[in-house]
Amino acid sequence: MSLWKNWWMLVGAFLSLGPLGSGEAQEEVRQQSREIFRELIEINTTDSAGNVTTAAEALAQRLRDAGFQEQDVIVAGPNDRKKNLVVHLHGTGQEKPILFLAHLDVVEARREDWTTDPFQFVEKEGYFYGRGTVDIKDGAAILVTNFIRLKKAGFAPNRDLILALTADEEGGNFNGVEWLLKHHRDWIDAEYCVNLDGGDFMSDKGKKIYGAVQASEKVYVDFQLEVKNPGGHSSRPTRDNAIYHLSEGLARLSKFNFPVELNEITRSMLEKSAAIEGGPLAKDMKAAAQPSPDVAVLVRLSENEFYNAILRTTCVATMLSGGHAPNALPQTARANVNCRILPGEDPSKIKDSLAKVVDDPQIKVTFVEQHDADGNLIRPEPVPPSPLRADLMKAVESAAAGIWGPLPIMPVMDTGASDGRFLRMAGIPTYGIAGVFLDIDNRRAHGQDERVRVQDFYDGVEFNYKLMQNLAPGK
């Protein structure tokens, strides 16, 4: 009798790892993922008033209830509000672990700006609404759902799978990935990382266009441009005016372009985008990917704000302040210049370039200081791209085809920033693979009425489940 019982348990485990049908198994997974998603959205995890630890503890309890041992579910961090969740699903150890990453914190959201309460999970007109539905509590819910599924199925991958859900990716002083690398790297050390907060999949009015693997990202650095002056009475103005000096320097910056620099990832991105796009733009993209592109081609592509950001480092003035009284000559004038620096470029050299461009010795250019969770000054550093992996690309293509049929998958460089930069600097290659389709012209991340299509979320659960098994096959 016990042999029959064991045999049926093995059959059940095998079936639970296969494609979901239209029956009870599919509905059970959908209900579970939806409930986890709802719980996360309704826990406020903003930096100002939220609590990431509450979300981490809630998910930890679900994982313990699913059979994870206490020692394999870790909730830890630098303070009571900013604790991270780390989970280990043990495998056979034939290969080094893979880390799966998302963050639990979200950007601020005001009720008066939204048509629904941003911290209530609302389903209407085929969408889930709420702060974090796109960035990136959908990813956190997907990962927790699938770790629970694999655990209950008794799946034994060929390597450990590690889940990390972290604090302060969106801002704040207690970035979870940075803290874990500094204090407990052994908890998250891996051959590479799959980061669901990157590599967006794109659709246009419901039509699937492409999937992405983010293999690099630009580096976020803020610079302060400052002019100081003795000032004086406004009734006796002079040309030596702090505001004039700064504004003239910023005008020179507005006309400046950093040189075009392409790498393995951006060349491949342009080539594969050309195959999807078609028309004159596709011709320019294909030409720009060549070793020595025509200058006219680069000029035309640079007129598009997206492709301009792909081609080069960009720096733009984002904040401005000056003066201390309406009837006094200004003693100070300051601007914040935000730069998105190409992978591998030295931020110190960008600082030197800014000083040359503004071309005024009275304009002092400095890094805007940032500090880690321990209060130490963070020095901006170059971030290398992650090497393209044929096995990873193949695994993504296979998982995507199993859900949506043949789909173009392209390596990309994101113009925004994610926690992948900390892992790349620490020697852990990181690949952004979201697996959830977004509307190409209506993404809403960080904006009002953030939302994700209901079916796209459920498809993302299944894509990620297949991807995990493709990357770490087992039994």
Image (tube, helix red, strand yellow):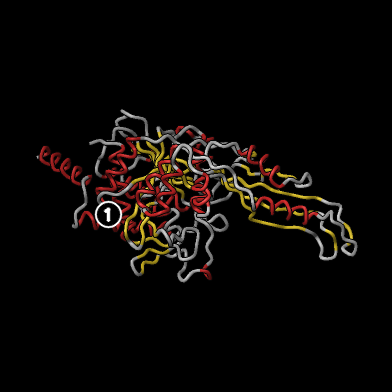
Horizontal side, residue 425 vs residue 15: left or right: right
Q: How many marks?
A: 1
Question: Residue 441's spot in the image, x, y percent?
Answer: 43, 61
Question: Residue 183's spot in the image, x, y percent?
Answer: 53, 35
Residue at 37% of width from left, 36% of height from top?
Answer: 98
Question: Residue 339's spot in the image, x, y percent?
Answer: 60, 47
Reading the image, the residue beneath label 1 is 29
**Amino acid type of the residue tagged 1 in the rendering:** Val
Q: Is residue 397 above or below residue 459?
A: above
Nearest the viewer among 250 and 128 is 250
Residue at 31% of width from left, 60% of height from top?
Answer: 455
Q: Is residue 174 above or below residue 117?
A: above
Question: Residue 217's spot in the image, x, y percent?
Answer: 49, 43
Instruction: Decide if residue 73 is in sight here.
Output: no
Q: Is residue 205 above or below residue 267?
A: below
Nearest the viewer among 385 and 107 is 385
Q: Secondary structure at mark 1?
A: helix
Residue at 40% of width from left, 32% of height from top?
Answer: 191
Nearest the viewer among 311 and 440 is 311
Residue at 73% of width from left, 54% of height from top?
Answer: 248
Q: Quadrant of the N terminus?
A: top left
Instruction: Decide if residue 446 is in sight here.
Output: yes
Q: Quadrant of the C terminus?
A: top left
Residue density around tag 1, few if under 14, some if 14–19, many if 20 or more, within 10 Å: some
